[in-house]
Amino acid sequence: MKREQELREILIHNTVRLVAEGGFEKATTKAITFDGETLPDMRMNEVYIYRIFGNKEHLYEAAFECLAEEFAEDLQRCVEYYRDASGCVRERLYEVFLRVWRFAINNETQCRFYIRYYYSICFKGQSLAGHNQRFSKIVNCFRPLFKDEADVVAIMHSVLTLLLDFANRVYNGDLADDDINRPHIYNVLYCAMESYFAEEVRKSANLRRFV
């Protein structure tokens, strides 16, 4: 049982790396099995993918679930900071942004995989419901900021994907991660949310501009 768990973790690790590097086309069952980490004294075989996960798509899903869980835990820590922090809403959200941004920048391989899977057919078909459930506590924390009629889940999804798109530009060398661009990125994310804020939140949140 322990050996199977170790093999499961290796197959997930190899999948994440291969998809991050070259997309799903590169992450064939053969590459996942033979191009990456292995267990000592064990001959890797593609049959293990089907024995443990059922098929390759379920392996992709399992890899995403592992990363989504890690991401959710990091975001939950950010939520706890937001609840305890002082200052206006805009300042507190900026500190949350910085923490999420650092996580994304420091975990390039994982986030590249996350981005590719997030935009894939597999995500909508297999992982969307679980993803929404996992992040529901985080969404509910920020729900009081928004108008009653606002679709907070969709808004938070949009902000997350926008942040990851910016992180991807940093990975590709198209954007510098520096003291000039970070506030600019935050302003873009903030503006994507601001029009949906409740009126009293909008009035109190704009006490400080990060420009």
Image (tube, rainbow, N blue to C red):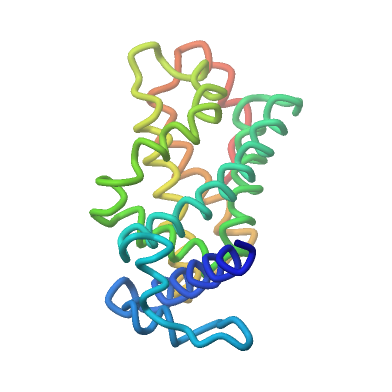
- Position above or below: 45 against 54: below
- Position above or below: 24 against 33: above
- Position above or below: 13 against 181: below
Q: Is residue 202 visible?
A: no
Q: Position of residue 138 (x, y in %)?
A: 55, 30
Q: Position of residue 172 (x, y in %)?
A: 44, 75
Which of the two residues, 79 or 5, is positioned nearer the viewer here? 5
Which quadrant: the N terminus? Answer: bottom right
Q: Position of residue 164 (x, y in %)?
A: 45, 55
Residue found 40% across the figure and 49% down from its top? 161
Task: Kindly indicate the quadrant of the structure image that contains residue 166.
Answer: bottom left
Task: Kindly indicate the quadrant of the structure image that contains residue 131.
Answer: top left
Q: Position of residue 46 (x, y in %)?
A: 37, 79
Residue found 32% across the figure and 80% down from its top? 26
Residue found 51% across the figure and 11% down from its top? 200
Which of the two residues, 135 or 169, is positioned nearer the viewer here? 135
- Position above or below: 86 against 186: above
Which of the two residues, 47 or 97, is positioned nearer the viewer here? 47
Residue found 63% across the figure and 64% down from its top? 106
